[in-house]
Structures are given as structure tokens and as C-alpha cells.
Image: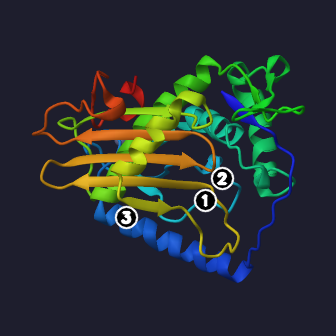
Amino acid sequence: MLVGKLNTHAESGTDMGQVQQAKKRRRERRNDLLNKYPFCYFCGGLNPATTIDHVPPEACFPKAYYPEEFEFPACFSCNQGARKHDQIFALYSILSDFDDQKFGNGPDRVRLDGLINAVKRNYPSAMPDFDAAKGIHRSGHIYTSQPVAYSAKTTPEMQEAAKFMEGKLTHALYLREVGKIMTPAHRFVAGIYQPQLDHTGALTEYFQNLLPNVTIGARPNIKAYGDRFRYMSGYKDAEDFFVFAAQFGRGCIIWGIVCGPGMRDPNIGPAGSMKPKAGGCGPDRTP
Ligand SMILES: [Zn+2]
């Protein structure tokens, strides 16, 4: 894992009246969502949805900065079964975000400090060893006197949480873009990478050329929302074929490819020879 330096200023404007309005809109959307999709998005549309799951997790964003309309109908066990992974992944996604602007003393800094404390307390072995992190003195081909980033060893719990989030985000964004729930007859492959690493440029270019639609997470009540979550996606109706690549700030990218029931297994781009998993896997069966 590469960790950006965390040392500059952030600014944001929040209007309290607009916050109330946003809350009301959120409540209405929640009711609409459970009426529209009575079954869980994550375990194959088999269990009734009784809760709203946030994907990406709320912990990835400062309080009140959760992007609008990333809420999904979930059964209780899919929602609850994800808590540990959600918190650990949130820490990973923020640590690997290279947007210096956000991590001075603004809301993102508060979120990051809160997450570090929470993960230390709840899942101490998931914390990367920052004391052992190595400074990277290079930007492109230029060597720098001060480190531009730190390389820290990703813990097994972080890898597990990232793997989990690949599956969860694939199910959520498929529903968001296609309007249907992934079933066990769907197959998918998904992955995560840091675009700052040297060998990943071709992958990012591949998705940029392939995917026509760009969605940028935002909240209308926050003027300077910043660059916190966005994704590119494409869908082919005839084959029920869906591809996306989502980025957390200027940090990690999660991608996924979903094949409809009638399609052969995906073997395009990064999917290569990866073994696809069945859709509707839920938190327990996501490898
Ligand atoms: Zn479920």
C-alpha cells in the first residue's frame, strides 16, 4: 500500500437548512427504495430487504459528506455482516488517497483520525505498521529530497476487507446502473489497485477507453464537496454485461465485470484468466 502525505488545508461550506432538507430527501428515498426493491441486493435477491446499506461505506467519508443516492436495499445479515470490513476498508481507502488538499485539519482529517482510533481499538491487528513504513523519494522520474509517499505493508485484514469491498461494490453499482439485482446466475470478477503504482497505468487507460459513463459522487448541500468518490461504467443490455471502475478520491480503484446468465465467462482486459464468482454471494461467501 502507498500512503500519501497528509499535511495541507481543506475548506468546505455547509448550510444547516440545507442539511435538514437533505435529511428529509434521504428518508423519502429510503422508503422509495425499499418499496421499489423489496429484496436484498447482495445475497441474490432471496432475502427480504429490511435495512439500507451504504456502499461505499459511510465511514469512507467525513460525517455529513456521504454522497447522495448510494443507498441499497439489504437484508439484516448482509448489512450487519459487513461492519468490520467496512471500517477497515474505510481506513485503507483514506490512507491511500493522495489528495493532499483534504487532509490538513478539515473534516477528512477528523474522519481519518477517528478511523485510526477505531481500528486500533476494534481490530488492532488490522493496523498497518507505520513505524516500519518506507519513504518514497521519487515522483515519476524525479527523485525528491522529501518523501512523496510512504510504502507500508498492507495487513491481511486490510486485504480481506478490500476483497470484500470488491464484491460488495460490484453488486451495488450493478443495481444502481442496471436497476436489477445480481443473482446466482450472474458471474463476476472484480479487483482493486492503486493507480500510483507504476505498473497500473495500462489498466486505468483500458477502463477510460472502454467505459462511456462517468458518475461523480456529491451532496448538493455542500458547495466544496471535492473529489471523494466517482466511477466510470458501461452496460450492454442484450448480454446483461456490466463493467465499472470506481475511485476513492485520488486513491484506490475498484473495478468489476458482470456477465449475465446467458454469457460466457468474462475474459476481457484485467479479467484475463481470473475465475469468476457467482452473483448474490453476500458477505459470508465472498472469498
Ligand atoms: Zn442479503
From mark 3 to mark 2, how far is it between C-alphas? 22 Å
Q: Quadrant of residue 184?
A: top left
Query: Of marks 2 and 1, which one's residue comes earlier in the chain?
Result: 2
Seen in the picture, residue 237 relative to 96 is either above or below; the reply is below
Residue drawn 60% across the image and 22% down it: 157
Is residue 102 toward the left or the right of residue 190 in the image? right
Residue drawn 29% across the image and 65% down it: 36
Residue 84, position as x, y percentages in the image = 59, 32
| Pointer 3 residue | 33
Which class describes the residues within 10 Å of circle 3: few (<14), some (14-19), or many (20+)?
some
Is residue 240 toward the left or the right of residue 156 in the image? left
Which class describes the residues within 10 Å of circle 2: few (<14), some (14-19), or many (20+)?
many
Give the quarter of the figure containing the N terminus. top right
Residue 238, position as x, y percentages in the image = 12, 53
Which quarter of the rendered image does ligand 1 occupy? top left
| Pointer 1 residue | 66
Outermost residue toward the front?
A: 141
Outermost residue toward the bottom?
A: 17
| Pointer 2 residue | 61
